Image (cartoon, rainbow, N blue to C red):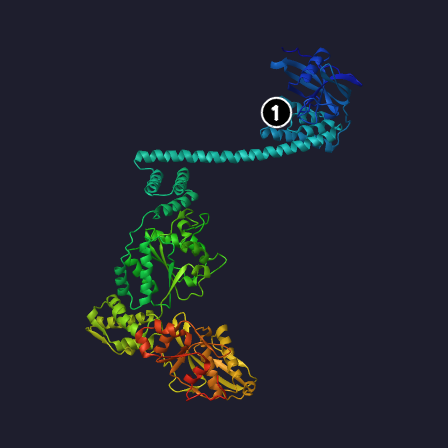
Amino acid sequence: MMEEFFKVPEVPSGEFEVPAMPLRDMVLFPTMVVPLFVGRDFSVKAVETALKRDRLIFMVLQKEKGTEEPAKDHIYRVGVIAHVIRATPLEEGKLKILVQGIKRAYLKDYYKREDHYWALVEPIEEVELKELSKEDRAYMSSVKELLDRAVSLGKQIIPDLLFVVKDLEEPGKLADLVASISDIKSQDAQKILETLDPMERLKLVHQHLSNEVGILEVQTKIRNVARERIEKEQREYFLRQQLRAIQEELGESDEKKEEIENYRKKLKSLKLSKETYEEIEKQIKRLERMHPESAEAGVIRTWLDWVLELPWNKRTKDRYHLDRVRAILDRDHYNLEKVKERIIEYLATKKLTKGKSSAVQILCFVGPPGVGKTSLGKSIAEAIDKKFVRISLGGIRDEAEIRGHRRTYVGAMPGRIIQAIKQAGTKNPLIILDEVDKISVSFQGDPAAALLEVLDPEQNKNFMDLYIGLPFDLSEVFFICTANRTDTIPRPLLDRMEIIQLSGYSEEEKVFIAKNHLLPKLLPMHGFKKEEVIFSDEAILDVIRGYTRESGVRNLQRHLGTILRKLALKKLRGEKPPFEVKDVKSFLGVSKRFTDREETPMVGLAVGLAWTEVGGEIMFIEATKFKGKGNLILTGSLGDVMKESAQAALSYIKSKAEEYGINPEEFSNWDIHVHVPEGAVPKDGPSAGITIATAIFSLLTNTPVRPDIAMTGEVTLRGRVLPVGGLKEKILAAKRAGIYEVILPEKNKEEVLEELPAYVREKMTFHFVKDLDQVFELALVREEVKKDGDH
């Protein structure tokens, strides 16, 4: 039922009683006309009572929105006397009403009677300003401008209402009207309602309207950006559709569609685990949804190319025919009997376990350069029909070189292990990890630690390259490491390796290798047939003795190549082969090496033996004395351990001075200087102990040392000679220098006699000693050492 429209009734002056209607979350302002839905029973009764009386009702905000039946403490003390213009019944006894605020009023009392609330109110008269200051007018103008700005930014306001606002010149009424149409929280609106001073009220409204305009500006900016983006995407979509239509008219295939189909075909051809298959399929779907020219599409495309090219299931069939393996090793490498036996044993275990034994550790060939470590790996790969790949680890300092870069980085790539697998094209190749002792550590990580996951059979079944991001099985890969020394290999990495020592070659071995391995390979490389160049054994020996100083044969190969190049030039100039090589000096120039040893005995000069990364070396140790205060001076490129050996040697001789006939006072009056010539090669270790002791003893007793005997051994403060390592290298170094007598520690006797080749043992004389007295007896040029007592 529609109620008849009434004129605004007069509000009584002074206190009077009127039906009350608490509002949940809305503030009614004077002059404001709003529709309301009335649902609570007591509010419906209050409206009905007002309609029966003078249509006046008191509307006031309740403090808590959720309070169903608010008492006096639950409502504010200032509300608005309103006029119920009309009321329309709705379903379930609810009403829809149209009300207009008339005047503010204080709440004097509030109580419930006849099923609804009543209020005792006192109307508040509006404060009138007689004159407006410039600031007041500025505020009024600013509020009107802000309202216009809000409308231009999309705020919905009835146009007629804007005209009313522009014509208003009373600050209080302007504040009430603008507050009624602004987006203000109910608590803030109540504060504006309770502000009776017109200008203060207008200032509050100005502040809230400014905030609202600011929010509208940000929203408009966001909408504009979103619209521009949508328009751009729609434009690109439209152009792509046009391009597709043009391609179809020209009969050209959709390259993107073809690319995706190719990826899916490759994926279906691989036998992968469920998780791996789903991840690759997910990335293909992502690529399918992307624009083909986007940067991310390029990253995914590169990743897919890598992943789908990996040999997830492709493998070669291993042929563990041990007789064939032995024949190929003998063909490619001379001697190295123990090394070959160890390789055969290793492969026998592999054969019995079908290549899957985790008990078989990683082989690591350790030895000087040029002794055939890498070529041994090649021979093994050929013998068992595996693909061969070499990875050089020398100088690597970035962990990502092993484990790959994360895909988020620019220029990301898989690590060297995965690259080697892809290069091999099978998941069970033979991979040589060269120079594993030269890995560096930096702020970019520890590559050696990353290698643990690669080489550990318990971990490498699910090796995770950071770029690939999918587990790859490395358990079928045959890894072989090479190194020049073991002390620089990190201990956890060394623990997973089977160390196989490759010693240097003797002169006889080098001659055989040159004739049967190096020259057959070098002659065709330089344009000669086998019978066109004849090298005598003496010529090869001259090259070995005069121009190379190494344990391996790399420099020997280089010098033989030099001779062949000069012969090739002669052949081109018309000289006819065969060429017989006898005088190597005419090809290689003056010998690069001088006589290694002195021919006459000298006081204070002893010959020692040292081990270096490039093999064995003879080492001269000189000692001299001069007036001083008993200091020991050490020069040459010596390490800390070698300096300590010198101190220990001198201390032992001091402790036995009287027994050796040395005046103890000499130690206080003389400085002793020990020097190691050719100190450019850093030498360290305790093995020079007995050599230093011999040089100092020779100096103090003025007894010459034999130049035709070399020695090695660690010395203690009690004069005992302790065992040392690298003996084969050292003995071969002495033999190369023409020294055929060697003093060695007694405890190294079994090792020397077992490991040295027979033809080396036959030409050498070994003296195995327990203490320094025996060393002095053998090394000094006299019948016996004079002593005052027994030792």
Picture coordinates of residue 142, whole percent (x, y): 67, 32
Q: Is residue 676 visible?
A: no
Whether residue 240 is situated above or below residue 580 in the rendered picture: above
Q: Is residue 699 visible?
A: yes
- The image quadrant where one finds the N terminus is top right
Report which quarter residue 739 is drawn in. Answer: bottom left
Give the residue drawn at x 40%, y 45%. Answer: 298
Q: Describe the element under mark 1 as helix, strand or loop.
A: loop
Identify the residue at the far right of this view: 14
Picture coordinates of residue 672, whole percent (x, y): 51, 83
Picture coordinates of residue 167, whole percent (x, y): 68, 24
Whether residue 162 is situated above or below residue 709 in the rendered picture: above
Closer-to-camera residue (22/576): 22
Closer-to-camera residue (249/372): 372
The residue pinned by badge 1 equals 157
Closer-to-camera residue (664/221): 664
- How many numbered badges does the structure rendering display? 1
Q: Amino acid at mark 1?
A: Ile
